[in-house]
Amino acid sequence: MAENIAIRGRGGEASTFLTTAQVIQGMFRLMAAGKAAEAADVYSRCQEDIGFALINHAQRDQRQLMALANVFYRARDFDKAALCCENLGEFAKAAQLYEQADDCQSAAEMYAKVENFEKAAEMFERTQNFRQAAELFLKVKNFARAAANYERAVNWFVAGKLYHELGKFRKSMELLQKVQASDESFQEATLLIGDILAKNGYLDLAIKKLLNVIKGRPVGADTAELYYHLAGLHRQKGNVEVARNIYQQLQQFDIGYRDVEEKLHEIASGAAPAATGPLASIPEGEGDDAAEEGSQIVGVMEGFDFLQKIPLFADMPLAEMKAFYNICEERVFQDGERLIEQDRPGMALYVLREGKVQVQRVEGAKATPVAELKAGDHVGEMSLVDEAPTSARVVAQGTVRAFEISRDRFLRFLQSNEKFAVRVLRVFVRTLCQRLRDTTARLTGR
């Protein structure tokens, strides 16, 4: 067989059909001669997939496998190049190539083998293996992404608990209330809900939530923790005698229960101790609106209306917008602080909730104001898809509160929400087309 292999369909060359064996032999001769580019050209023009046959022919010959990996990579057959690297034990390279080939499951396994758990988690997330993604994100202490994946894996309790630790109390409340009474985590979920309500000043509602779960049961092994937190809530509210009463009953149940003795000493230092007695009942009607099992507390997504007004998200269904709302970070900028710096890659979209910002064009040491934006306006949307340097500086005028949607968070959200991605990218295309038409009209004087 000649050194030059001719494949039917290439203009100016002979039209030749060859057997698989002939092509394989010819390609290995080209590789042995160091002609990787020619071998890749031949391989890429074969209509049939002979990649696995080439790998089988090389078997465990490391030199041939390395040469094949090079050929596959040049031909942009990344999954076969990855398989060669995997057979060679080059798991890190294999992981990168599997990712390039969009074989995220294999990429995740390879990243896990080299203990790159963050990337392994990202790959599992893209394959919608949310449980494994969540566990690995938790392993590397990426709690925000762990929470998001536990939520998508329908593990409401762990997701809600992580959001609670992250200080995202509205989201935590939403998920913790989905934990069923039959779930072993129900009691802890209730305690976390009570903590969120108390932190936000809703002590009465927190007390009612705990009483709704206690349901009049006495202090015991299954209710002690609920009563302990109930006592703390009553003490915060100023119901010192009720709190003392509960602490004393906890002491009767277990004399060394947590720091009850210390709590009683603290109360005693400010008020005379009361005799131990039955748990004081709440006034008639106080718990009526929480009496029904499963009653839900509804949180409000502050600033959600600002997001809905952005043209970029105008066509988004409510469910998708609610999911998107949860990737937004709340930021506070002080007077003179820069949200965006000119001539540097933009990193995020900002939606203003409170305050004003000034858009400035910087030339040398001179900053010329060109626009002022207020609550409800947004800036930096092109940075979500374009890493080009920004065209202006954006500076806070006084204290500014804003939502920040970083490029990284946005792109990850698109990867796991295909419908949202299609809608957003369609709007981007429409926006860019309109800007191009406007620019063309200005240049042509129309």
Image: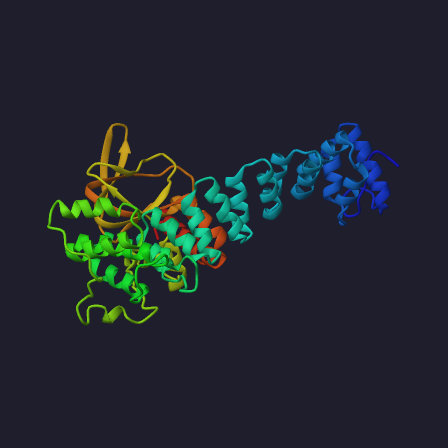
* In the depicted structure, whether residue 54 falls above or below residue 374: above
* In the depicted structure, whether residue 282 falls above or below residue 59: below
Pick whichever, 340 or 366, lies toward us. 340
Q: How many marks?
A: 0
Pick whichever, 231 or 265, lies toward us. 265
Measuring from the top left, give residue 263's x and y in whole percent.
21, 47
Measuring from the top left, give residue 378's x and y in whole percent.
30, 50
Q: Quadrant of residue 325?
A: bottom left
Pick whichever, 311 or 354, lies toward us. 354
Visible residue check, residue 327: no
* In the depicted structure, whether residue 153 falls above or below residue 212: above
**How was the colour assigned to the protein in this rendering?**
rainbow
Pick whichever, 198 or 260, lies toward us. 260
Q: Residue at x 27, y 33 (%)?
A: 362
Q: Residue at x 25, y 48 (%)?
A: 260
Q: Residue at x 58, y 39 (%)?
A: 111
Q: Quadrant of the N terminus?
A: top right
Measuring from the top left, give residue 100's x and y in whole percent.
59, 42
Visible residue check, residue 176: yes
Q: Quadrant of residue 348?
A: top left
Measuring from the top left, give residue 267's x and y in whole percent.
16, 48
Furthest-right residue in this view: 1
From the viewer's perspective, tell me whether residue 7 is left or right of residue 224.
right
Q: Quadrant of residue 25?
A: top right
